[in-house]
Amino acid sequence: VTSVVSAGECMIELVELGDGLMRRGFGGDTLNTAIYLRRCLDPQRCTVSYMTVLGDDPYSDEMVGTWKGEGLDCSLVGRSPGSLPGIHAVRTDASGERTFHYWRDRAPVRDLYRDDAYAELLAASASADLFYFSGITLAILDDPSRHRLLDDLRRRRENGGRIAFDPNLRLRIWQDAGIARHWFKAVYPLCDFLLPTFDDEIALWRDSSPQDVIERIGEHTEGEIVVKCGSDATHARACGQGVSVKPETVRDPVDTTGAGDSFNAAYLAARLEGASLQEAVHAGQALAAHVIRHPGAIAPPLG
């Protein structure tokens, strides 16, 4: 049985509906990817676990119940007595542009790699065949915790595990761009799959083309690099071989939330099952195309 672990933060989400009303849900990039990985992989042959830390409150209980309903293994969810998960609110202006407002500074997941607070969780997940995390997972940790995360990645690779990373840049949760660049460069050599988004790479590194992204990251890693470019062609390179794959055109997308997270899941699932680079990119594009036809990050299952 193949085991996959996705690690990161899930937050309570409040979406403004107007007239002072809000709809409550929850969301997080690594959770989205975990749910789609679960859907893409055969449950008889693969377990998918979500690793995070929540509080001991009713909202945290509700999250875990929903994740179990999606088929995720929740044995790696730590619970911090007296704590609450982070919250973010989403406002949409008249043109459909969304802005996010965060209350996350005391979220218990920030302690995942602090001292030995959750050493049992890390030990229990140490033999995972694939460990997935994102730039948000990295950004919410303090520096000593980031060093411990890097040590954890090294140990996982020594044990034969593979590492997948989406830089998923959110500059507002990094102290500054230089610090983000420093930690991303530290992570690259430890990764087997790197899944950046071109717009993020332009913002952080001033890359002028997806090929520039591949060349720059490729100086630091032997891993596969897949550059997501929205409705433009996806560029990928593995073992010195490159592909460029144009996605199908989606007329009138409803909501692009979760598109990159779902692409990552379908791509990684396909590669785990032996698909070629081109086939895996097609799989990622097909799932992302389905997701953007529906509101919210988690679309109804395909078929």
Image (cartoon, grey):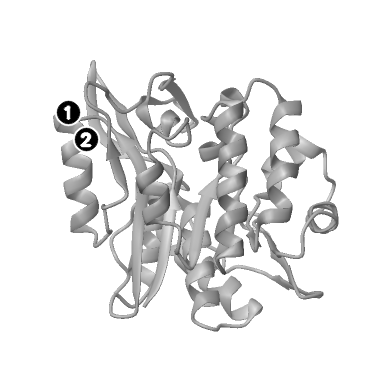
In this view, the residue farthest toward the left is 58
Q: In the displayed structure, would residue 174 be above or below residue 208?
A: above
Give the total of numbered labels. 2
Q: Which residue matches tag 2?
A: 60
Q: Is residue 202 left or right of residue 81?
A: right
Classify mark 2: residues with Cα within 10 Å, few (<14), some (14-19) or many (20+): many
The picture places residue 267, in percent across and down from the top left corner, at 54, 68
| Mark 2 and mark 1 residues within 8 Å of each other at the beta carbon | yes
Q: Secondary structure at mark 2?
A: helix
Residue pictured at 66% horizontal, 69% vertical: 246
Q: Is residue 17 left or right of residue 193?
A: left
Compare residues 239 and 206 and report the one nearer the observer. Answer: 239
The picture places residue 207, in percent across and down from the top left corner, at 83, 44
Q: Which residue matches tag 1?
A: 57
Q: Is residue 255 left or right of residue 279?
A: left
Classify mark 1: residues with Cα within 10 Å, few (<14), some (14-19) or many (20+): some
Q: In the displayed structure, would residue 222 be above or below residue 216?
A: below
Residue pictured at 45% horizontal, 66% vertical: 287
Residue type, numbered disc 1: Asp
Residue 146's image quarter? top right
Compare residues 121 and 252 and report the one nearer the observer. Answer: 121
